[in-house]
Image (tube, helix red, strand yellow):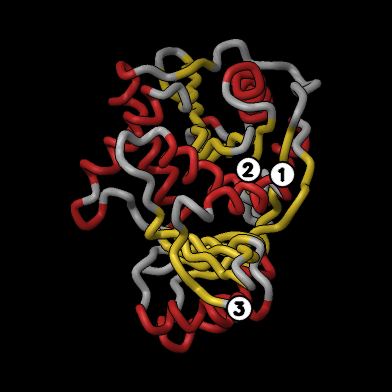
Amino acid sequence: MAHEIRALDVHSVDQVRSLIEQDPVRHCFLAARLEQTKQSRFRPSYPDLLGYFDDGKLKSLLMTGANIVPVNTSLIARQEFAAVLNRSGRRSSSIVGPAEETMDLWSKVSDSWGPAREVRSSQPVMTMRNNSTKEIDQDVRYSNLSDLEELMPACVAMFTEEVGISPTANGGASAYRNRISELVSSRRSFVKYQNSELVFKAEVGTIGAGVAQIQGVWVKPEYRGQGISVPAMAAVVKLILADLAPVASLYVNDYNEVALNTYRSVGFEQVDTFATVLFS
């Protein structure tokens, strides 16, 4: 049987789990996607997961939702996936994943998809499996719904600073607030106040295969450089490892030396490199 590209079904999903097990940190996006479907009350469906099969065996996979994510892709698989993406046109806001796979896939669709808003070709992926040896900020806690009025502006500010576009643009305010509320309700949002002022926050955006991926780390601008971030992040890691997953992970732009130094001080170590291509 020749190779083929087709959407996953319930009969091939077990093969996806074997791909995840090869590298849970790299593939936690995919693991979270499968776990989301498992918790659904509806019949499992995977229209957003394209598989590259060779003689009936799943070799590579492409997530095609809001973000395009290549999973264990070979050169020939990326060529086949790129052909599909070129035919369908761009419908996603980014391509993100292992640097080599992401950049090669982007090179194959860039002519038809038009220019990217930004290409971040080197983003260290870092993990921790043990608590930090640094001082832990005891004031860092899980947020609750009463924090939302303070938390929302901080989340919008951080997102805009990091991505370059406000998440509330083009009528997105309600959906973004719902997303933050969901993270708060599921105990995946962390805050620190100082004199009743929110000065630090972070979220866990993805949990899958025993990996919790941290996102949205933010210190209020007026409080930066005052030694808040290291003990606060040490506290976030402690809460994650105790309650959410045995591995805490994150990825960061290689040019963000301040953030890299913070994470290294906390105890994070680089295990991989991602890349992200952002679109308007």
Q: Nearer the viewer, residue 134 or 226?
A: 134
- Residue 235 against residue 213 in the figure, above or below: above
Secondary structure category for the residue under label 2: strand
Residue tagged 2: 250
Q: Which residue is mark 3?
A: 1
Q: Residue at x 59, y 76 (%)?
A: 78
For badge 3, the amino acid type reads Met
Mark 2 is surrounded, within 10 Å at the Cα level, by few (under 14), some (14 to 19) or many (20 or more) other residues, namely many
- Between the residue at mark 2 and the residue at mark 1, the CA separation in whole angstroms equals 5 Å
Q: Amino acid at mark 2?
A: Leu
Q: Tell me what residue is drawn at x 54 percent, y 48 percent.
A: 29
Question: What amino acid is found at the position of numbered circle 1 in the picture?
Answer: Met
First reached walking from the N terminus: tag 3 or tag 1:
3
Residue at (21, 41) in percent of width and height: 174
The numbered mark at residue 260 is none
Relative depth, front residue between 272 and 18 = 18
Numbered marks: total: 3
User: In front: 113, or 63?
Assistant: 63
Q: Residue at x 40, y 51 (%)?
A: 160
